[in-house]
Image (tube, rainbow, N blue to C red):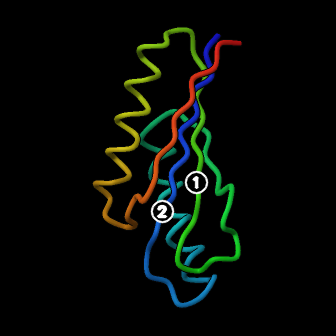
Amino acid sequence: MVVAVLELTLTFYAESLKDKRSVVKRVLARAKSEFNVSAAEVDELDNPGGAVVAFCSVGSDRRYLEGQLTKLEEFVDRLEIAEIVDAHRELLNV
């Protein structure tokens, strides 16, 4: 079993935490509906101008999961809701 994790550091314009929540919710909801992944905001919770979101998927084919993470990162970038500042991927054999 392989666990694939993609962590994206995002930056965007938001005046308040309420505006930020709207941006993060849209990114997470669209990614979850397009890909079969779990997603959550995991860091920078009190920063209105940025967020760290993580996506996770589990499977048996390592190459498929690597491709899925690549497509997911490109998808979030194409949304143009937020700019990706940093991306970190990890594939764990369990």
Residue 64, x across and y down, in percent: 42, 17
Residue 9, x across and y down, in percent: 51, 57
**Disc 2 from disc 1: Cα separation:** 8 Å
Who is closer to the viewer here, 34 or 43? 43
Residue 27, x across and y down, in percent: 47, 59
State the quadrant of the C terminus: top right
In the figure, residue 43 lies in which quadrant?
bottom right
Residue at image position (46%, 69%) is 11
Q: Judge from the rendering whether residue 36 lies leftward or rightward of residue 47; answer left or right.
A: left
Residue type at mark 2 is Leu
Residue under numbered circle 2:
10
State the quadrant of the N terminus: top right
Q: Judge from the rendering whether residue 28 lies leftward or rightward of residue 43; answer left or right.
A: left
Looking at the image, residue 21 lies above or below residue 6: below
Residue type at mark 1 is Val
Q: Secondary structure at mark 2?
A: strand
Residue 14, x across and y down, in percent: 50, 84
Task: Decide: few, some or many residues near mark 1? Use Cα within 10 Å; few <14, some 14-19, many ≥20.
Answer: many
In the figure, residue 44 lies in which quadrant?
bottom right
User: Mark 2 near mark 1, Cβ–Cβ under 8 Å?
Assistant: yes
Residue at image position (54%, 82%) is 19
Q: Residue farthest to the bottom?
A: 15
Q: Secondary structure at mark 1?
A: strand
Residue under numbered circle 1:
53
The total of numbered circles placed on residues is 2
Which numbered disc flags the more N-terminal residue, 2 or 1? 2
